[in-house]
Amino acid sequence: MITAIVFVKADVDRIPEVAEQIAALDGVSEVYSVTGQIDLIAMVRVTNHEDVANVVADRLNKVPGVTSTETHIAFRAYSQHDLESAFSLGLD
């Protein structure tokens, strides 16, 4: 499994719509709205490098409202977090 972390700059007026469209792409596991010099972080999890190119270059970059991206490929994971439990509100 290849994990790519994609920093996304987007039109400010369209950030929620851009995030939803990116999140709907096959290969994108999560999209976060963040503070700082970028607007969104997309986590791409695919089986090979060609799939990274297909997701980022061929589809994510073409989402209306995306103005630029910067992609980082992860070499190793040093921790495994259960995202569902990490963001749980404890309302079981």
Image (cartoon, helix red, strand yellow):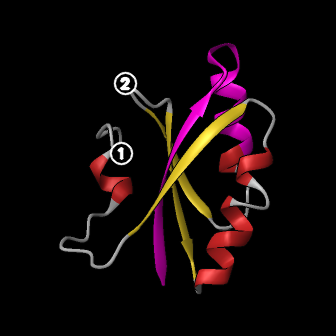
Task: Looking at the image, tell me whether mark 2 or mark 1 is earlier in sequence order.
Answer: 2
Residue 48 position within the rendered picture, expressed as x and y whole percent measured from the top left: 59, 86
Residue 88 position within the rendered picture, expressed as x and y whole percent measured from the top left: 33, 44
Residue 80, compared with residue 38, is above or below; it is below
Residue at the (48%, 66%) spot, across then down: 4
Residue 71 located within the stretch drawn in magenta: no
Q: Secondary structure at mark 2?
A: loop
Residue 18 located within the stretch drawn in magenta: yes
Marks 2 and 1 sit apart, C-alpha to C-alpha, by 30 Å
- Which quadrant would the C terminus be assigned to in this image? top left
Residue at the (66%, 60%) spot, across then down: 56
Amino acid type for the residue under numbered disc 1 = Asp
Residue at the (26%, 64%) spot, across then down: 81
Residue at the (48%, 84%) spot, across then down: 1
Residue 6, compared with residue 14, is above or below; it is below
Q: Secondary structure at mark 1?
A: loop
Which numbered dot is residue 33? none
In depth, the one of 45 and 52 nearer the eye is 52
In depth, the one of 57 and 26 nearer the eye is 57
**Which circle, 2 or 1, is nearer the viewer?**
2
Q: Is residue 87 left or right of residue 69?
A: left
Q: Which residues are magenta?
A: 1-21
Q: Which residue is mark 2?
A: 35
The residue carrying pointer 2 sits among few (fewer than 14), some (14 to 19) or many (20 or more) residues within 10 Å by Cα, namely: few
Residue 13, compared with residue 29, is above or below; it is above
Q: Which residue is mark 1?
A: 92
Residue 82 position within the rendered picture, expressed as x and y whole percent measured from the top left: 31, 63
Amino acid type for the residue under numbered disc 2 = Thr
